[in-house]
């Protein structure tokens, strides 16, 4: 199960996969089907959409044939992500001819980027709703049932859906996402997110802690706090108290030592020693940081408007390792960004050698219309060069990852059981605090999902540790 979830999450990051919702246990007169693409934020949003639709009498189904409403929660991050969604829309065409009353809606980042164009281009789309307008869905559905097409792609400065309790339909009942902020103010030149999700805003800290507490009360043992740049979380309570990310982390960690706390994504310019010390102080804040570097070359980083240098990034990694020597670190890398030379590509490889990431998401640059890079720079690195550089980066990462996993042999990790192993019902699967998947045989002990065990590692593949329960 864990491996399945991991695979799904990995694929989500590629913007290519989808996960149909789990069947809704309740009985509703009308049914909706939703597929989500893109990042965890989109998946979390689909749970908010499900909650809004529930109050209107719609239940989730994973059976397309019985759906009255089909939604695609879409991603624009790379061209390929959009192509996947377009292809999917075309496969719905046939269904729609067989069932004319069925409505098809496009939600999320593509809705924002393409707006009403989607209604014209893909003639089968009835509803287009952007990420800040989900509260208007019920009204738009009613309008559309009257024969009209409807669009709401207004971005908001303050919508955080703080009061909406998400319906956890994609979860394993143990690990859940909690969205802590929306939008992004960073304006990395390659990135479409500031345009599709608008300005950054932080959600009320009290509602975040309450949602995490209610997940814990319902048996969840892990929450992942989500935002495009969690380190810039900043909320002022009505009585003037300032809540920064390290304070929020602490409050969520204090719910229970049995509740694991993770977060994503950190920005190298914003992550502070205060956050690192808070992580070190609480055993249940997982020792794992996803810290996207994008490039190892300072000129390219400036072109990307990442606002840090190679040296700054290396310093941050040093601080993480100084404060938490056992912390897992992963990253995102874009290769072949506008004007990147061979030497600059070598800088990315050498930075990887210095950091030795435990995991990385690696992409070749995909120009996105409307971004600053699309306006200012030429996408001038040839496709075959991008491809070759990406292969070099992936191969180097794989070799680092092999070393990282081999180095765990003989060590003992605390693992939270997330379910049975995908490969065998005789094995449990969970993750270490460093976010590595750990698989181990079941014993006579009466264990269940959400329990913590100590596992001594005896072998490893390139992405899984294998061991036995000790103690
Ligand atoms: N907020 C996060 C990233 C969100 S997008 C951060 O700042 O780290 C996830 C990843 O997609 C980015 O880290 C980047 O590596 C990749 N990405 C974004 N835009 C891209 C583009 N135009 N081409 C290729 N990869 C891109
Ligand atoms: Fe995009 Fe940069 Fe914001 Fe991340 S920080 S979402 S890469 S603009
Ligand atoms: Fe994609 Fe939007 Fe997330 S563009 S990566 S779904 S914020």
Image (cartoon, grey):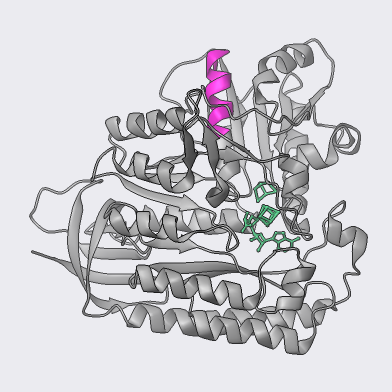
Q: Is residue 305 visible?
A: yes
Is 289 placed left or right of 334 in the picture? Answer: left
Where is ligand 1, by quadrant? bottom right
Query: Is residue 45 placed above or below 425 in the rendered structure?
Result: above
Query: Quadrant of the rendered structure where residue 332 is?
Result: bottom right
Left/right of residue 281 with respect to residue 147 in the rendered view? left
Work out whether 369 lies above or below 70: below
Image x and y of residue 51, in percent: 52, 23
Tally the numbered discs. 0
Residue 33 horizontal/vertical position (percent): 59, 31
- Residue 374 relative to residue 271: left or right: right
Residues rendered magenta in the picture = 46-59
Tell me if residue 98 is in the magenta stretch.
no
User: In this view of the protein, which residue sits in the foreground, 334 or 129?
Assistant: 334
Left or right of 416? Residue 79 is right
* Nearer to us in this view, 22 or 381: 381
Considering depth in this image, is 147 or 280 the residue closer to the camera?
A: 280
Q: Position of residue 290 (x, y in %)?
A: 50, 62
Image-quadrant location for residue 343: bottom right
Q: Quadrant of the C terminus?
A: bottom left
Answer whether residue 286 is visible to the viewer in this image. Answer: no
Does 52 sit above or below residue 362? Answer: above
x and y percentages locating residue 369 in the rendered image: 87, 53
Q: Residue at x 18, y 57 (%)?
A: 453
The residue most toward the front is 240
Which secondary structure is most common in the magenta stretch? helix
In the image, residue 56 lies in the stretch drawn in magenta: yes
């Amino acid at each position: 199960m864990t491996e399945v979830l991991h695979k799904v999450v990995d694929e989500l990051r590629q913007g290519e996969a989808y996960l149909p919702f789990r069947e809704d246990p309740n009985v509703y007169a009308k049914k909706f089907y939703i597929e989500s693409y893109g990042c965890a934020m989109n998946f979390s949003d689909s749970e908010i959409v499900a909650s809004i639709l529930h109050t209107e009498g719609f239940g989730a189904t994973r059976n397309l044939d019985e759906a009255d409403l089909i939604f695609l929660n879409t991603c624009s991050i790379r061209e390929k992500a959009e192509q996947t969604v377009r292809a999917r829309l075309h496969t719905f065409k046939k269904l729609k001819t067989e069932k004319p009353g069925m409505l098809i809606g496009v939600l999320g980042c593509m809705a924002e980027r393409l707006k009403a164009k989607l209604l014209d281009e893909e003639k089968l789309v009835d509803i287009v709703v952007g990420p800040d307008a989900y509260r208007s869905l019920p009204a738009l559905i009613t309008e559309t049932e009257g024969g009209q097409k409807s669009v709401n792609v207004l971005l908001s400065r303050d919508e955080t859906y703080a009061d909406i309790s998400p319906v956890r339909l994609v979860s394993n009942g143990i690990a859940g996402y909690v969205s802590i902020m929306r939008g992004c103010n960073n304006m990395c030149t390659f990135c479409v997110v500031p345009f599709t999700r608008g300005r950054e805003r932080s959600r009320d800290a009290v509602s975040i802690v309450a949602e995490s507490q209610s997940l814990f009360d319902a048996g969840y043992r892990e929450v992942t706090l989500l935002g495009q740049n969690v380190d810039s979380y900043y909320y002022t309570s009505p009585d003037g108290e300032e809540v920064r990310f390290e304070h929020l982390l602490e409050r969520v960690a204090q719910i229970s030592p049995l509740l694991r706390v993770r977060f994503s994504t950190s920005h190298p310019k914003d992550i502070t020693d205060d956050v690192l010390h808070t992580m070190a102080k609480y055993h249940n804040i997982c020792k794992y940081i996803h810290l996207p570097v994008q490039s190892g070359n300072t000129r390219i980083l400036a072109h990307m408007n990442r606002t840090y240098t190679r040296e700054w990034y290396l310093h941050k990694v040093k601080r993480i390792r100084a404060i938490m020597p056992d912390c897992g670190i992963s990253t995102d890398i874009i290769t072949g960004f506008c004007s990147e030379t061979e030497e600059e590509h070598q800088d990315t490889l050498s930075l990887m050698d210095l950091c030795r990431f435990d995991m990385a998401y690696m992409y070749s640059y995909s120009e996105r219309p409307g971004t600053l890079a699309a306006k200012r720079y030429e996408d001038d690195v040839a496709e075959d060069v991008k491809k070759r550089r990406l292969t070099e980066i992936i191969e180097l990462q794989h070799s680092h990852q092999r070393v990282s996993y081999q180095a765990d042999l003989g060590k003992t990790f605390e693992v939270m059981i997330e379910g049975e192993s995908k490969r065998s019902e005789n094995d449990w699967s969970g993750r270490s605090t460093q976010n590595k998947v750990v698989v181990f045989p079941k014993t006579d002990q009466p264990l269940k999902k959400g329990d913590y065990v100590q596992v001594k590692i005896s072998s490893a593949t390139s992405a899984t540790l294998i061991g036995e329960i000790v103690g």
